[in-house]
Amino acid sequence: MASLGIFDSGYGGLTVFKAIRELMPEYDYLYLGDNARAPYGNLSFETVYEYTLECVTWLFEQGCDLVILACNTASAKALRNIQQKVLPERFPGKKLLGVIRPTAEIIGNFTQQKHIGILGTAGTIQSGSYLIEIDRFYPELKVVQHACPLWVPLIEANNYASEEALAIIKSDIEAILEEDEKIDLLLLACTHYPLIKDQIQQFLPEHVNIISQDVLVAESLKDYLQRHPEVESKLKKTEDKQFFTTGDPADFEAHTFMFFGKNIEAQQVKLVNK
Ligand code: DGL
């Protein structure tokens, strides 16, 4: 029997994990954060691919048959290559899912104007992955996007409500609204951004709704498991949760309440190339 693996560059995936755990508390989970090498947001395609592959390999080696890349940047820059080039040869039978496709599949249901804005890390935005995936499901949507490279560091430093932080958030919101004034839906396409939903909201006109992916991804995973009983039936159901980080476990633990809403104990993982 296997645990469900969840990977993120660091703490951010805990927002996704929180929503998954709330919806499906029965399963065993193994979370890995690559904190020693995070943030991934500004790293090259090659580097994000290499780091993500190393972490996913570790999760597979721990016995996870299904791993969720709970990180937009890794989903944008590494998922497809790993799915197409690595899994069939090295890990046949293992499954890897990201956060972009489940979001793209459903996003069209939340906009009336059919104009949406996407906020994410520089890596996610530059990859164009959301534009490609959304176009597949909703070619009629007009989508604009904007990178917010300062938001992750502000959130991790717990500094997102300061005057300086609010000025940065305001200017990014203004920038995306200027791109398309008809936007009525703003997607928070980064694991960290749900934490500053209130701060973002205050700079948005009333008719613009925010959608964050944590709940979307959890619901999509539940649906996936219902459609794939061959995967679901192999998952352990003892509600066990284990947390691993490539960084300092004490530092990881100090951040978890903010992202996960619970205190946890983390263990350190030493990866070969780290
Ligand atoms: N987890 C990343 C994402 O969702 C944000 C943090 C990072 O840049 O590593 O894009």
Image (cartoon, rainbow, N blue to C red):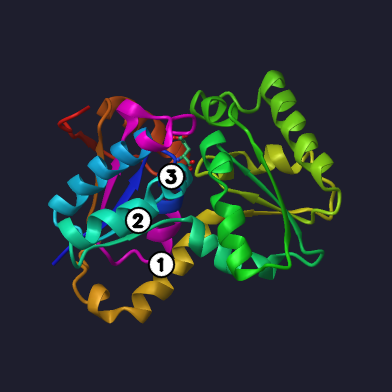
Q: Earlier in the sequence, mark 3 or mark 1?
A: 3
Q: Secondary structure at mark 1?
A: helix
- C-alpha span from label 3 to label 1: 21 Å
Instruction: Residue 77: give its label.
Output: 3
Residue 98 in the image: above or below residue 26? above
- Are the residues at dot 3 and dot 1 in contact (C-beta closer than 8 Å)? no
For label 1, the crowd category at 10 Å Cα-Cα, with few meaning under 14, some 14 to 19 and many 20 or more, is: many
Q: Earlier in the sequence, mark 2 or mark 1?
A: 2
What residue sits 65% from the left and 27% below the top? 161
Q: Quadrant of the C terminus?
A: top left
The x, y position of residue 264, in whole percent, is 30, 40
- The disc labelled 1 sits on which kind of residue? Leu
Q: Secondary structure at mark 2?
A: strand
- Are the residues at dot 2 and dot 3 in contact (C-beta closer than 8 Å)? no
**Residue denoted by label 1:** 221
Of 159 and 187, nearer the camera is 187
The x, y position of residue 40, in whole percent, is 42, 33
Q: Secondary structure at mark 3?
A: helix
Residue 63 in the image: above or below residue 71? below
Within the magenta stretch, is there residue 59? no
Q: Earlier in the sequence, mark 2 or mark 3?
A: 2
**Region in magenta:** 18-46
Within the magenta stretch, is there residue 42? yes
Is label 3 or label 1 in front?
3
The x, y position of residue 216, in whole percent, is 53, 62
- The quadrant holding residue 74 is top left
**Residue denoted by label 2:** 68
Q: Residue furthest top?
A: 164
